[in-house]
Amino acid sequence: MTIRSGTVIRRRALFEEAVEIIEREYATDLELDVVARRLATSRRQLQRAFAEAGQTSFRTHLAQVRMRRALELLREGSLPVREVAGRVGYRQAAQFAKTFRRHHGRPPSSFRREGQRAAGARSTENSADGGPPERGGNLDDTRPGLAYSTASA
């Protein structure tokens, strides 16, 4: 079955508009139905747009955007994993860690430690150059960095 060129163009436009919404609002509780309503289309049409124009699904694309941003935040090294999870739209740190590990092949805490080591190296380099040392670790530097834990706060 051949798809009309007008349909292809419309689905491409729907996909691009939905991607813009995801990029802006990935940290909120985005749902396919809500995005479809905002774009004045049906759930099924938006699913088709993601499948045909993006070769992915809404849920997969949203997870990819969240995981990309989470990696950026973790590499900065200053936020606890639980805080990063919340900032990228996950209410449960355990679910975030599971998704992150599946997506990146390593637990989020390992990337956070890398970010802290890099910040420490920059701090040493800057202070050796006479520049101000950068702060690393957690936000207030009053306690050691926290690795991911399943214990409740």
Image (cartoon, rainbow, N blue to C red):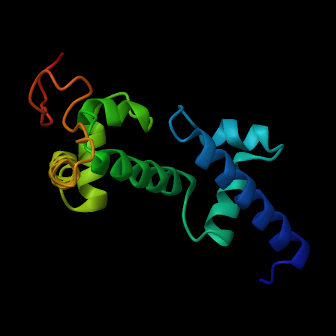
Residue at the farthest front position: 130
Q: Residue 106: where, in percent of width, then height? A: 18, 57
Residue 149, above or below 76? above
Q: Quadrant of residue 6?
A: bottom right
Q: Residue 112: where, in percent of width, then height? A: 21, 46
Q: Quadrant of the N terminus?
A: bottom right
Which residue is pictured at 48% across the width and 53% down the height? 65
Residue at the farthest bottom position: 2
Residue at the farthest top position: 153
Which residue is pictured at 14% across the width and 21% down the height? 142
* Number of numbered discs: 0
Q: Residue 102: where, in percent of width, then height? A: 26, 57
Q: Is residue 16 left or right of residue 84?
A: right
| Nearest to the observer: residue 121 or residue 58 | 121
Q: Is residue 112 left or right of residue 41?
A: left
Q: Quadrant of the C terminus?
A: top left
Q: Quadrant of residue 55?
A: bottom right
